[in-house]
Image (tube, grey):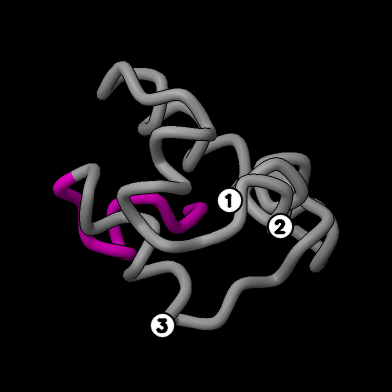
């Protein structure tokens, strides 16, 4: 898997986790303190988040970064 595929897969996993929790991008933005536009770009595979940002995003969803990392 190349870097672009990896980021796209990561973004899809985050979007899936967000939707399972019933969160919109706006609600996740409010809960995590990460800009909605950043979340959108991340879910499209256009951003490569730091571990700190990933943790901020996943905390409101009750997830650990390992749970959304592509295999």
Residues at badges 2 and 1 in contact (C-beta under 8 Å)?
Answer: yes
According to the image, label 1 marks what residue? 10
**Left or right relative to 27: residue 35:** right
Q: Earlier in the sequence, mark 3 or mark 2?
A: 2
Q: Residues within 10 Å of mark 3 (few under 14, many from 20)?
A: few
Q: Circle 2 sits in a helix, a strand or a loop, which is it? A: helix
Residue shown at 35% from the left, 67% from the top: 56
**Left or right relative to 56: residue 69:** right
x and y percentages locating residue 27 in the rendered image: 40, 34
Disc 3/disc 2 C-alpha distance (Å): 16 Å
According to the image, label 2 marks what residue? 7
Residue shown at 47% from the left, 74% from the top: 53
Asked which quadrant contains residue 7, the reply is: bottom right
Q: Earlier in the sequence, mark 3 or mark 1?
A: 1
Q: Residues within 10 Å of mark 2 (few under 14, many from 20)?
A: many
Task: Find the magenta span and give its range.
Answer: 62-71
**Left or right relative to 38: residue 51:** left
Disc 2/disc 1 C-alpha distance (Å): 5 Å
**Left or right relative to 32: residue 21:** left
According to the image, label 3 marks what residue? 52
Front-lying residue, 10 or 56: 56
């Amino acid at each position: 898997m190349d870097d672009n595929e990896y980021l796209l897969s990561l973004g899809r996993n985050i979007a899936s986790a967000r939707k399972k929790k019933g969160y919109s991008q706006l609600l996740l933005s409010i809960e995590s303190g990460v800009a909605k536009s950043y979340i959108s770009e991340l879910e499209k595979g256009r951003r490569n988040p730091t571990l700190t940002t990933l943790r901020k995003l996943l905390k409101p969803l009750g997830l650990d970064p390992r749970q959304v990392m592509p295999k």
